[in-house]
Image (tube, rainbow, N blue to C red):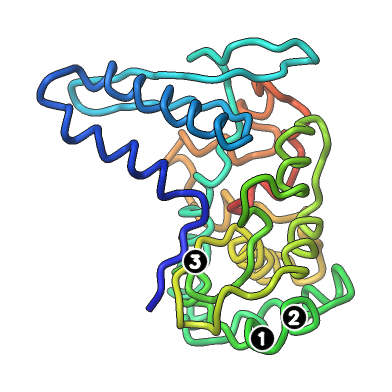
Amino acid sequence: SVVIIPRVSPVMKVLSTVAIAASARSLHSIYQQVVNEVVAWAKSNGDDIAIQLGWISKDLAFTVASGEVTDRLVRRAVTTHDTWLYGSGTKPVTAVAVMRLVDAGVLTLNDTLAEHVDPFLRRDNGTTVAELFGDSVAQATVGQVVRMAGGVPDFEDSAGDPFDREVLQDGYKEWPVYSFIRYSAQQKPYCDPGQCTAYSSTGYELLGLLVAAHQHATGTYTDLNLTAAALPDPARMPSLRFLGKQGPLAQALTIPGQAANPAWGSGV
């Protein structure tokens, strides 16, 4: 099989230096250098990014930050005290929500994603997986999409992509999930299902539709409660309260305009 990880290889090369240098310097200083180098590399490639990274272990806790952000039209350096949306960190939660449906016997990993998503997608947005992505992606199984092997094209698969750049730069705009899905549908599938592994946020948006379809038989995507779907007893993991649209994270965001955006809560 082929592994496709867009825009990741240079970053991974930088991160690989951590293990080599760990014996000579503190992890704190090493990771500060790493994020500085990643930001510099991105800037040299035309991407204006900022990074905040936290480390927590039994004996050590620290946060590092690098880059700049436009905060209410004012350009400033990112600090370790800024609060950001969790972004792709929700993908594992989305995967857990799907696996709970598997455990409950509602679906299997060998079911096609389309058979569970199409009725909901047709009602909520007037289309189907096949109409959007073609017959190949429509045959992708739930398991393949969870494993990033469904061939689902992504909305951020090339540096400088205009839609991706607009999303990143306009932090105060609410982006409906179907904006991401319909833009991605204009791209060519990465491969036939099961023939490659390719990172796809869009695939996880479709899994969000699957969870929403089984959570709300007559509702819409914006009714999705990912916390309840993945964590029937959220008290066991109180740190995930940020997934709630009215939770503490939504009240403390450095860029508050994205707080109500359902797309970010489903695994982007």
The quadrant of the rendering that contains the N terminus is bottom left
Kind of residue at disc 3? Ala
Please say if 263 is above or below 4: above
Q: Which residue is mark 2?
A: 118
Marks 1 and 3, how far apart at CA: 22 Å
Looking at the image, which residue is at 46% across and 54% down? 92
**Label 2 neighbour load within 10 Å: few <14, some 14-19, many 20+:** many
Of badges 1 and 3, nearer the viewer stands 3
Judged from the image, the secondary structure of the residue bearing numbered disc 3 is strand
Tag shown at residue 60: none
Please say if 265 is above or below 118: above
Q: Which residue is mark 3?
A: 198
Please say if 218 is above or below 83: below
Q: Is residue 98 left or right of residue 115?
A: left
Q: Is residue 71 left or right of residue 240?
A: right
Q: Which residue is mark 1?
A: 115
Kind of residue at disc 1? Glu
Marks 3 and 2, how far apart at CA: 23 Å
| In the foreground, 87 or 262 | 87
Q: Which of the marked residues, 3 or 2, is nearer the chain's N terminus?
A: 2
